[in-house]
Image: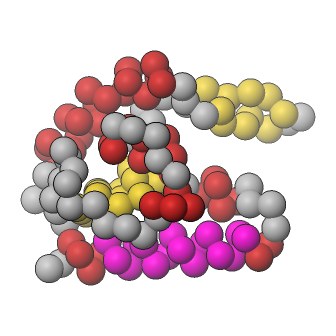
Amino acid sequence: MLSAYITNAVKHFKWAPRNKERIHKKANGQEMQAGNPWLETEIQRVKPKVILALGVTAGTALYRRLVNIQKEQAILNHDSLYAPKLLISWHPSAILRAPTEDEKRHRYSELKNDVILVWAESHC
């Protein structure tokens, strides 16, 4: 059994061209549901003590409801279908796309603290 499992939960990425870059687009509900069998199989094989869901899409897939990172980030859920403990935090792309440098630093700090919390909880 691994102690922790960190996932963005999406198994298929769609994108849109922007200049010379490919910008990833958020998965819709049908796309999230289509990836659930793979996600659930991975979790069953890994059998983590704690899961860290990166972003709203991962949180929605694992909590099975729409989540709000600003309100639910850093709250350890002990009533998860997938692991004894579940936590949601910022997806790295949400940090990079934050509107200000202060907000980027704030989100990065929160993600870093959440990773530390997951590590600590996984070694209890």
Decide if residue 24 is on the left or right side of residue 8.
right
Location of residue 7 in the rendering, given as x and y in whole percent from the top left corner: 39, 50
Residue range corresponding to the magenta coloring = 103-118
Is residue 8 among the parts visible in the rendering?
no
Number of marks: 0
- In terms of image quadrants, where is residue 84? bottom left
Decide if residue 103 is on the left or right side of residue 113.
right
- In terms of image quadrants, where is residue 87? bottom left
Identify which residue is drawn at 46% across, 40% down: 66
Identify which residue is drawn at 21% across, 50% down: 80
Q: Return the residue nearer the eye: 83 or 75.
A: 75
Q: Return the residue nearer the eye: 43 or 74.
A: 74
Tell whether position 50 is magenta.
Answer: no
Identify which residue is drawn at 28% across, 61% down: 77
Q: In the image as oriented, which residue stretches furthest toward the front? A: 71
Q: Residue 18, relative to residue 62: is it above or below? A: above
* Secondary structure, magenta segment, majority class: helix
Q: Return the residue nearer the eye: 71 or 17.
A: 71
Q: In the image as oriented, which residue stretches furthest toward the right? A: 19
Quadrant assignment for the N terminus: bottom left
Is residue 101 among the parts visible in the rendering?
yes
Location of residue 57 in the rendering, given as x and y in whole percent from the top left corner: 49, 41
Quadrant assignment for the C terminus: bottom left
Decide if residue 11 is on the left or right side of residue 80.
right
- In terms of image quadrants, where is residue 36? top left
